[in-house]
Amino acid sequence: MKINFNLSVAFLLFFGTTCFAQFVGGGGTAPVKNDKESAGPWKNRGYIYGGPCIPMGTWKKAPVASATISDAYTNNTGFGAKTGFYLEMGGMYFLKKLKLPESMAFAFNFTYLNFSMNKFDWSSLGPNFEKANSKNFMFLSDKFGLQYSYQIVDKFFVDAYFNICPTMAFLGRVKTTGDVAEYHYSVVANWSGASPSLNSSTYATGFAFAFRKSIGFNIRYMPFTFGLDYLFGGIKQDVYSTILDNRNHSNDQEIITPTKFYANTLQIKLGFTF
């Protein structure tokens, strides 16, 4: 999947900055450590971060009345996602035995919990889709991966990392009003009376599990931290289409359409490393 261009530029600037700092700081002659266990800068750290969670890509666009739920869950149309918030906590576990210059280290980055929530708005589709009856997108994730850290001066560090993110996704719900208020599917759309004896509906289960990925960087002036985290990857979701024959329910039909939904987000990181 194509990663946001601005984020790629940020990483190029990050690595350029660390290389330049290593050069002007005499990094070429820095002593190599045999054991970093006694080095204060690279002791294991905990962190707690939070901030805005900005939807990226198609799902942030406004929904289209003619689109189907399958269109929405395959990112062929917008989902009306809005900027939400996130909170995470975890730790950095530095690999102290590696023989590296004093100013550099690698770490195992493990986020115990990342919770994020984004609202969405379908009210533009008409009175049957009221914002007040919408449930939010919610994601519960762990993150684990490798982190590269560089110490610029005493309390000033920069980090870059790549993580794998097991994710439980709650993919929203719209409860409609009017003729279909009695139906409580996770997402209800395109309800129509095909004839006096037929009804049809399309809905999705609203819950999924996926392995997503994240890439990002931190700027730490201990204990304060600022950073960006780009969370991406597909979430598989089954969409069910049902036709009910009120004359003879043995003729009822259900069609299952597998989809892959991309709820990519940019998380702006504000918090503390301790």
Image (spheres, rainbow, N blue to C red):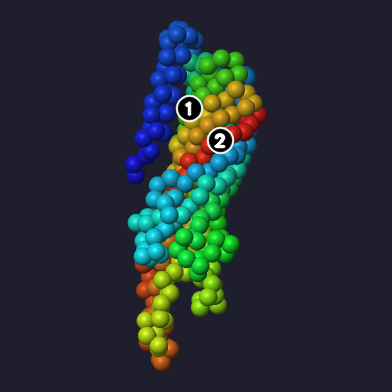
96 relative position to 251: left or right: right
Res. 115 in view: yes
Q: CA distance from mark 2 to mark 1?
A: 17 Å
How busy is the neighbourhood of tag 2: few (under 14 within 10 Å), some, or many (20 plus)? many
Q: Amino acid at mark 2?
A: Lys
The residue under the point 34% across, 56% down is 76
How busy is the neighbourhood of tag 1: few (under 14 within 10 Å), some, or many (20 plus)? some
The residue under the point 41% across, 23% down is 13
The C terminus: image quadrant? top right
The residue under the point 39% across, 85% down is 198
Quarter of the view holding residue 253: bottom left
Decide which of 126, 33 is in the foreground and name it: 126
The residue under the point 50% across, 69% down is 128
Q: Which mark is residue 269?
A: 2
Of the two numbered discs 2 and 1 in the rendering, the one whose residue sits closer to the viewer: 2
Q: Position of residue 165 (x, y in %)?
A: 49, 46
Q: Is residue 159 above or below residue 229?
A: above
**Residue at the extreme bottom:** 247
Q: Is residue 172 above or below residue 16?
A: below
Q: Amino acid at mark 1?
A: Tyr
Quarter of the view holding residue 1: top left
Q: Is residue 3 above or below residue 122?
A: above
Decide which of 99, 246 is in the foreground and name it: 246
Decide which of 273, 198 is in the foreground and name it: 198
Q: Position of residue 64 (x, y in %)?
A: 39, 60
Return the disc, 2 or 1, that comes first in the chain's sequence: 1
Res. 90 in view: no
- Residue occupied by mark 1: 148
Q: Position of residue 119 (x, y in %)?
A: 54, 53
The local secondary structure at tag 1 comes to strand
The local secondary structure at tag 2 comes to strand
Q: Position of residue 99 (x, y in %)?
A: 48, 19
